[in-house]
Image: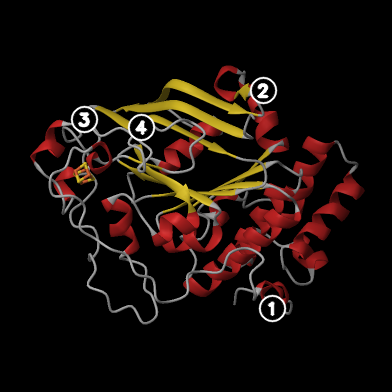
Amino acid sequence: MTALLEVEDLTVRFYTEEGVVTAVDGLSYRVEAGETFGVVGESGAGKSVAALSLLGLIDDPGRVERGEVRFKGEDLLSIDEFALRSVRGDEIGVVFQDARAALNPVYTVGEQIAETIEHHLGYEPAAAKARAIRLLDRVGIADPEARYAAYPHELSGGMCQRATIAMALSCEPDLIVADEPTTALDVTVEARILELLAELADEFDVAVQLVSHDLGVIAGTCDRAMVMYAGRAVETAPIEELYYDPKHPYTAGLMSAIPRIGDDRDRLETVPGTMPDLIEVPSGCRFHPRCPFAEEACARTDPALVDPETGEAATFDDDRAAACLEYTEGLSGGLDYSVEVDGERGRKRGGPDAEAGRDAGREGDPDA
Ligand code: SF4
């Protein structure tokens, strides 16, 4: 069956003075209706570029060179700007990293939400205002009538992010693309915003593509996830499997950065080194200069994304895939790591504390 979003062989390049940067290289994945799909990797992995490509927001010197982005079966890369803008407002909502910058400073937050509703849903101004106020209330902004008339600079970072979530939901989209939505927020506010996003995704039955550099955030929020490295997917899995049984050394390295209660295992420290230069990527496995398990073959052979159980090429519909020579019998030493999870991982949507979270901060600024 066709997934809500199907990205196939997406390739995005930036033509810079230094050279051609292949930021996303042959990326394929799907997002099912109603699911929360995480995309995780360090800065430079290509996850935000991939997200912006879906929305037609790649500017010069960037170019989508190849691939398809099928949303409800229609390739968004082949429709005109006008049609794409309509899909972007009506059916795909966006939550950006810097909420304050995403809001227009010369209009009140309420006016901006109401304007979106008028434009995309054809509401009369009074009805659009009423709907905007209801949404501000629903995203946990106290005294929504008064806050409707507040300018972005009068709200905290957390409140601005709540307002952009309200805006993203305002036209009842089928998909929300959230690009590092909590990076600019402190850790307590981050937890509340993620909880809100997960809760609203359930309530509005909307799929979410959540982009984050933090595997802990992804593990606590998503149903499935894809790990990206140097423009490519290196692992995809349902979140429980990714968290408890990572198949790729890079995923295991990212996991080592998540603090866990009572965790005294002898584990990989953070992933050593940095993301490679995407103008000239390493030969073979792109991760080999940083991989603690790299062998000679790793510098020669580019591992395909395969089913780690069978070693067969992963298909578009496979939930579990990893790109490491280990799964095609290309390693002699094997992958020598184990993952033991003693502490609690982040709460998924609808978890035991969701009710308490719903009531948090109904007075004053919920993110203060
Ligand atoms: S192919 Fe080699 S370098 Fe790449 S992840 Fe596997 S072991 Fe590490």
**SS under mark 3:** loop
Label 3 crowd bin: few (<14), some (14–19), many (20+), radius 10 Å = few
**Amino acid type for the residue under numbered disc 2:** Phe
Q: Position of residue 300 (x, y in %)?
A: 13, 31
- How many neighbours does mark 1 have within 10 angstroms: few (below 14), some (14-19), or many (20 or more)? few
For the point 68% across and 31% down, the residue is: 87
Above or below, comparing residue 98 to residue 322 in the picture = below
> Label 2 to label 4, Cα distance in Å?
41 Å
Q: Given the current orientation, which residue lies at the most extreme front position?
A: 310
- Cα distance, mark 2 to mark 1? 42 Å
Q: Secondary structure at mark 4?
A: loop
Residue identified by numbered label 1: 356
Find out whether the residues at labels 2 and 4 contact each other: C-beta distance under 8 Å.
no
Identity of the amino acid at label 3?
Answer: Glu
Do the residues bearing badges 1 and 3 touch, measured as CB atoms within 8 Å? no
Tell me the residue that label 2 is attached to: 82
How many angstroms separate mark 3 from mark 4 (CA)?
A: 38 Å
Instruction: Tell which tag, 2 or 1, sits nearer the viewer.
Output: 1
Q: Residue furthest bottom?
A: 262
Q: Residue at x 41, y 33 (%)?
A: 314
Disc 4 target residue: 312
Left or right? Give the position of 73 relative to 308. Answer: right
Name the kind of residue labelled 4 in the image. Glu
